[in-house]
Image (spheres, helix red, strand yellow):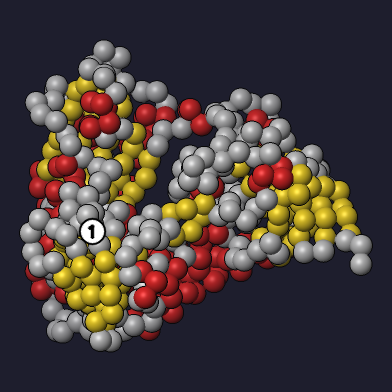
Amino acid sequence: MVPSARTFDAIIIGAGQAGPPLAARLTGAGMQVALIERKLVGGTCVNTGCMPTKTLIASARAAHVARRGAAFGVLIGAVGFDMTVAAARARKVSDDARNGSESRLKATKGLTFRRGHARLAGPTTIVVGDETFHAPKIFLNVGGRASVPPIAGIADVPYLDNTDMVALDHVPAHLIVVGGGSVGLEFAQMYRRFGARVTIVERNRRIAAREDDDIAAAMTGMLEAEGIEIRTGADCVRLDRDGDGIMVTVDCVHGDRVVRGTHVLMATGRMPNTDDLGLDAAGVAVDDRGYIRVDDRLQTSQDGIWALGECNGRGAFTHTAYNDFEIVAANLLDGDDRTLAARVDGYAIYTDPPLGRAGMTEAEAMASGRDILVSMRPMAQVGRAVEKGETTGLMKLVAEAGSRRILGAAIFGVDGDEAIHAALNLMSAGATIDDLRWAVPIHPTAAELLPTLAVELARPTSTAG
């Protein structure tokens, strides 16, 4: 049977957070577009990332607040937790978002939506099953997945990744989390609040390794106060079966060398979904980790092919993937000249309280050789935090002394994921600490302390780690 062949103006591989809005813009401009998705519309965010995890985090916070009710004069008695209800709610949130997005795609005029594994067969050719598609413009939005390192014993024991965790409908007796980054910390706190015993095993000297020492120390204290055991400096990790459970052997400075649990979550990073995409056939270059190399306008090494979202290694978040779409669409359709260089990096870790981050850490700013200014305030001095009885954490501001540009900000505390936008938006607009200094924030809020931090900026007296 001779494979069928069709020609389009553009082909998009992957229906994550950049693919569908790009399809809408391209078809809206009159193009005939093919969008191929081999699994679930919405990508990681909708199906195994942001939406289900933050829905579960909301359940964990509800349980936590209920248990603290007496401190606020709310008497409700013993607090129970039903994991089946929480899991079903998370599934519904994901299902509704995915189904809605898929319905919109199928109703888009000028869009051909196909399910299947797409492979590049050349710089303008895509093969999907027995179909061949041609287009002068190809956009790759294939995302990524959990990466599991070759830890000794990993092939001999059952383990979970983030996809498995959001599908759980029961609470483990003792969850061992291997990895102290954002995914590991969020699941650790979440399941501790669900009722599990939790141990975090991290190979670095501290959790939250990409953050400044003071932020990491505050996060450590918060998690330990909730009963989570944290084992750092775990340079030699091994997994073994232990009856019906799992035994993790660690080489740490302090504590027992063995941690025994019922479940293990591997939260050790991500890898791109590029290994079976046929990139070589199209002359698309990747780096040593498999991420697609792109220039500042998301163009790959092959003219006419762009890479958006997590697979390009330039941002592992929903908001950066969407911004990739915005950059490409503005340049191709609006006659604009948008670049990645103009993007101010920002993200959040959704522990409770959350960490909101924008731009550089203090350590990064110091390592850049700049003459910097730094200020810090504990959340215990923030009225909003005191009033809500949630004084864990701190906020920081980093600026350049000469230009007075805001280089970075961190808010680890109540509403930190929202309040950080006061700094992020000013940074995106190129504002200075003087612009921030004379802002008049609303009281009482978490963000109202940012102008105060601008006033208190001074040269750092120690290293940030």
Q: Residues within 10 Å of mark 1 (few under 14, many from 20)?
A: few
Which residue sits at x=47%, y=74%? 91
Q: Is residue 322 left or right of residue 220?
A: right
Which residue sits at x=14%, y=50%? 218
Position of the C terminus, as image quadrant, is top left
From what the image shows, is residue 452 above or below residue 105?
above
| Residue 152 at least partly seen | yes
On the image, the x and y values in percent for residue 404 come to: 28, 18
On the image, the x and y values in percent for residue 194 come to: 25, 76
Dot 1 corresponds to which residue? 236
Which residue sits at x=92%, y=62%? 2
Q: Is residue 465 left or right of residue 299?
A: left
Residue at the farthest right position: 2
From what the image shows, is residue 344 above or below residue 389?
above
Q: Is residue 256 left or right of residue 295?
A: left
Q: Amino acid at mark 1?
A: Cys
| Residue 447 at least partly seen | no
Q: Quadrant of residue 437?
A: top left
- Depth check, front residue: 269 or 86: 269
Residue at the farthest top position: 402
